[in-house]
Structure formats: structure tokens, C-alpha cells
Image (tube, rainbow, N blue to C red):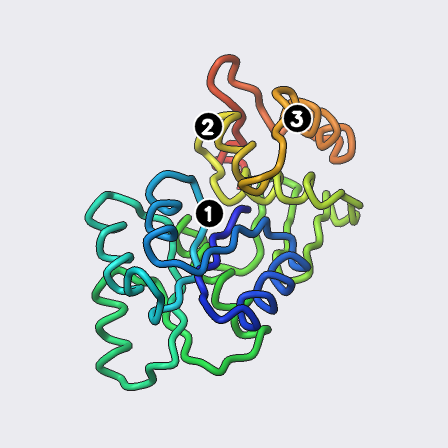
């Protein structure tokens, strides 16, 4: 999944990007408020981690503009502002969760997983469709209880389809979630990954809807 990290402190931004990259996310970094708003308004992100104190445009202003424009990706707000009134203001502006600085990376990951999960209507940490069970915390996939070794991109692809089980996900959307803003995206990359994933999982749960995209039916959960 592709995540936009908006943070002007290079030390914090680097640590967050390294942590999220190690957890299987594709990261875009932005330090300027105006640029961050533009990226969130024009790119498809699975989630956003948003600092409030930014140059160019304040984080709350960015968030309000995103929500007013219909951008509904989950947003986890970071801020050194620790008062309860400021946290309420962030939630009222459209944030899905609020994490005050300083914070532990394990808590950041847990909160990010939670807002992503809730945004897709999943109540439990584990995602299950048919015989496939995916554990986002351990980045572990099993089929009928048997662990499956997946590459990072295969894992991201499966996780995104399972997160949106029941919805036909267009190929272009999948490609955008698998690659960063500056990475080359080969036209058949998603088709190749789907083929490899099907062979490794040995299941027919991933369906192709010709001309529309791919789907894992929610009724199989």
C-alpha cells in the first residue's frame, strides 16, 4: 500500500519512512504543506501520515481541504501540540487518529494499521478470505494454515485486494499502490504479479474481471 508521509523534520521523516518501508508500505515523502496538499489531491494513497506544523500550509488546513474535496483516505495526524483541545480539533477536521510527539514506531505502525483496517470496514487485525489469512502485523500469509512465502510486491498486492474484498479494483489503482511516485510502472506488471500470486497461493479466489480489474469476493470471507 502506498502511504504519503508529510513531515518537515527530516530526522522524523526518515525514521518513519524506514519503519514503514520495512513493514511493507510504499512511501512518498513530502515536507512542504502546499506540495503535500497537491499530492494528496491528485494521487491515490492508501493512507496519509500528516504532521500539523508545516511550512507553506498548516496540516489542519490541508486536511480540511482534502475532506472538502472528497478525499477520504485515512489520515493519522502527528503533532507536538499535546493539548486535548488541539487533538479534538484534529479529529473534527477529519483525522482518523491522532498521535502526539514523541512517539514509538511500534505504536505508529499499530495505529496506521488500525486506521487502514477501519476505513475498509475490517474489525479484526487479521484479514481472512476463504482459506487465505493475512496477518499485517507479522506480514504473514497462510492458505489452509500453510505459510506462503511472498515477495514484498506480491504481499502488497494481496493485502490491498483483501483489504478491499468484494470490490473490483482497477489495474491502474493496483499499480499506483505498488509503486512510489518516481518508480517506473510497466504496463503488464500487475498482470505478471497476479499470475505469480495465483501460482503461489494455488487458489482461485482472485478473479479477473476483464476490462475492469481484479477482485477477491467478500462473500468468501
Task: Report crowding for label 2: few under 14, some 14 to 19, many 20 or more residues within 10 A (C-alpha).
Answer: some
Q: Secondary structure at mark 1?
A: loop
Q: CA distance from mark 3 to mark 1?
A: 19 Å
- In the rendered structure, which disc, 3 or 1, sits on the residue that comes first in sequence? 1
**Residue visible at 72% across and 43% down in the picture:** 143
Q: Hey, which residue is sitting farthest bottom in the picture? A: 83
The residue lying toward the viewer, choosing from 128 and 174, is: 174
Badge nearest the viewer, 2 or 1: 1
Disc 1: which residue: 46
**Residue visible at 52% across and 35% down in the picture:** 176
Q: CA distance from mark 3 to mark 2?
A: 18 Å
Task: Report crowding for label 1: few under 14, some 14 to 19, many 20 or more residues within 10 A (C-alpha).
Answer: many
The x, y position of residue 99, in whole percent, is 42, 75
Q: Considering only vertical position in the picture, is 218 above or below 37? A: above
Q: Considering only vertical position in the picture, is 196 above or below 53? A: above
The x, y position of residue 151, in whole percent, is 75, 43
Image disc number at residue 168? 2
Q: CA distance from mark 2 to mark 1?
A: 16 Å
Q: Considering only vertical position in the picture, is 205 above or below 60? A: above
18 vs 60, left or right, is: right
Q: Considering only vertical position in the picture, is 123 above or below 216? A: below
186 vs 29, left or right, is: right
Image disc number at residue 189? 3
Q: Hey, which residue is sitting farthest front in the picture? A: 56
Image disc number at residue 25? none
Q: Secondary structure at mark 3?
A: helix
Amino acid at each position: 500500500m502506498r502511504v504519503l508521509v508529510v513531515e518537515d523534520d527530516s530526522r522524523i521523516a526518515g525514521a518513519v519512512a524506514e519503519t514503514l518501508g520495512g513493514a511493507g508500505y510504499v512511501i512518498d515523502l513530502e515536507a512542504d504543506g502546499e506540495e503535500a496538499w497537491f499530492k494528496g489531491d491528485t494521487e491515490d494513497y492508501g493512507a496519509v501520515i500528516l504532521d500539523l506544523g508545516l511550512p507553506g500550509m498548516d496540516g489542519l488546513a490541508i486536511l480540511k481541504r482534502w475532506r472538502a474535496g472528497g478525499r477520504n483516505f485515512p489520515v493519522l495526524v502527528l503533532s507536538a501540540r499535546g493539548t486535548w483541545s488541539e487533538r479534538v480539533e484534529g479529529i473534527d477536521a477529519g483525522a482518523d487518529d491522532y498521535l502526539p510527539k514523541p512517539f514509538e514506531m511500534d505504536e505508529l505502525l499499530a495505529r496506521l494499521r488500525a486506521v487502514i483496517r477501519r476505513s475498509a470496514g475490517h474489525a479484526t487485525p487479521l484479514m481472512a478470505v476463504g482459506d487465505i489469512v493475512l496477518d499485517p502485523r507479522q506480514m504473514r500469509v497462510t492458505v489452509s494454515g500453510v505459510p506462503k512465502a511472498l515477495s514484498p510486491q506480491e504481499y502488497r498486492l494481496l493485502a490491498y485486494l483483501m483489504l478491499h474484498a468484494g470490490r473490483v479494483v482497477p489495474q491502474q489503482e493496483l499499480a499506483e499502490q505498488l509503486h512510489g511516485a518516481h518508480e517506473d510502472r510497466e504496463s503488464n506488471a500487475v498482470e505478471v504479479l497476479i499470475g505469480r500470486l495465483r501460482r503461489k497461493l494455488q487458489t482461485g479466489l482472485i478473479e479477473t474481471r476483464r476490462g475492469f480489474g481484479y477482485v477477491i469476493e467478500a462473500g468468501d470471507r
